[in-house]
Image (cartoon, rainbow, N blue to C red):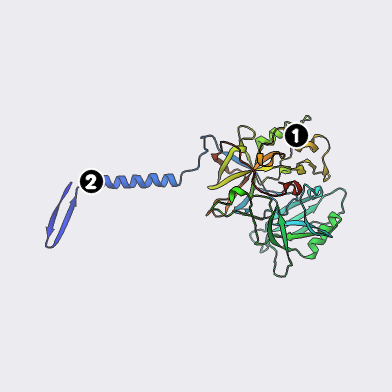
Amino acid sequence: MGGTTRSGDVEYVHIDPRLFYSCLAILLAAYYYYHQILNAPPRSHDGSKPLKISEIYVYPIKSLRGTRVKAALATKNGFQYDRTFMLLKVTPEGLKNMLVAQYYEMTQFLTSIEQPTVNEKKKPSLKVDFVSPKGPKVDPLIIPLEPDTTNLETLDVTMHRSSTSAFKMPTEYNAWFSKCFGYEVVLAYLGPNRRDVLFEDLKSSLDEHQITFSDCAPYMVASKTSLSDVSSRFSDGKEMDMTKFRPNIVVEGAQEPWQEDFWAELNINGVNVPLAHNCVRCRSINVDYATGEQAPGEEGEVLKKLQKDRRVDPGMKWSPVFGRYGYWKKNQGPKPFSVGDEVFVTKVNKERTTWTWKSDWGAEEPAAQ
């Protein structure tokens, strides 16, 4: 095992080389396995193959048609630029929130995010096209996605009892939308402000959950497999349009429809995304995008069809469920999500979660983001 020798007042300890190298090997092995564990790729809870992101949507202006993108920067408050603007109707009683469930004509506005090239010094902008067959013919509107708020008037916005301050956009933007709608509206910009998430079961959470002008959560996750189940309810063979459910992230690869009801957490690109609540549905899924009115035939009865067997959340017992609301864990920085990214279901619940947001959802129409 070794021994000692003395030289003057100094005593030297001799270690057996075999012991030294054995200890070194153990330390190196421990370091290797610890490093492997820390950097190991995530695994699905049951060892099944990972899902994949098939579609990503960003909705810069709440309740207008979304922008389908190949990649988006995911943050704790949602995708960058998601629902950072919203429209309010000017009424004698004051400003009224505009949601697609109450204003079907909002589906007649198409949006696209325009990113500058590497050599351009411009900031990203939003192009809005008005495509209503009945409305006035107007040129597209270009809106800066990060407008200067220095001289803008402020206003208060309350959605589902969660309040925030916002900025009233300049006259030219309000006038353009007012002309399209045929009545006076105001375009509000959120800026750096945020709204609190008010689900009762999240109040004791150590994580701070705040959102933009989205209804309830930073993200809405939907499954293509479940969409196929919705489409199967049409007798004429038509396919349900996923965009009517207004998801942020669409995943493909689930073996069965409605498996997502029990998903508790996803891992996407190394980021943990807890799924804490169901997305309950309203009549906005019955709209006809071609006309901005109630869809004819079975397409206008999607809500009714889902009410037969998808009222699975006792907290909102009259509303059918499609999709899951996703959040952001504390101390996770922004991360890009891309179409094709693997999605791991890392946690599942034994039972479905229950809606706990105390609000007058019946009047405000939930999930009409």
Give whichever of 123, 98 is nearer the camera: 98
Q: Residue 125: where, in percent of width, then height? A: 71, 59
In the rendered image, which residue does mark 1 sit on? Answer: 305
What residue is disc 2 on?
19
Mark 1 residue crowding within 10 angstroms, few (<14) / some (14–19) / many (20+): some
Assess disc 2: are there few (<14), some (14-19) or many (≥20) residues with their C-alpha within 10 Å of its C-alpha: few
Classify 116 as above or below 311. Answer: below
Q: CA distance from mark 2 to mark 1?
A: 73 Å
Q: Amino acid at mark 2?
A: Leu
Residue 177 in picture, x, y percent from top left: 81, 57
Q: Position of residue 72 (x, y in %)?
A: 63, 51
How many numbered discs?
2
Secondary structure, mark 2, is: helix
Residue situated in front as seen by the camera: 95 or 259: 95
Q: Tell me where residue 326 appears, x and y as whole percent.
A: 61, 46
Q: Residue at x 76, y 56 (%)?
A: 87
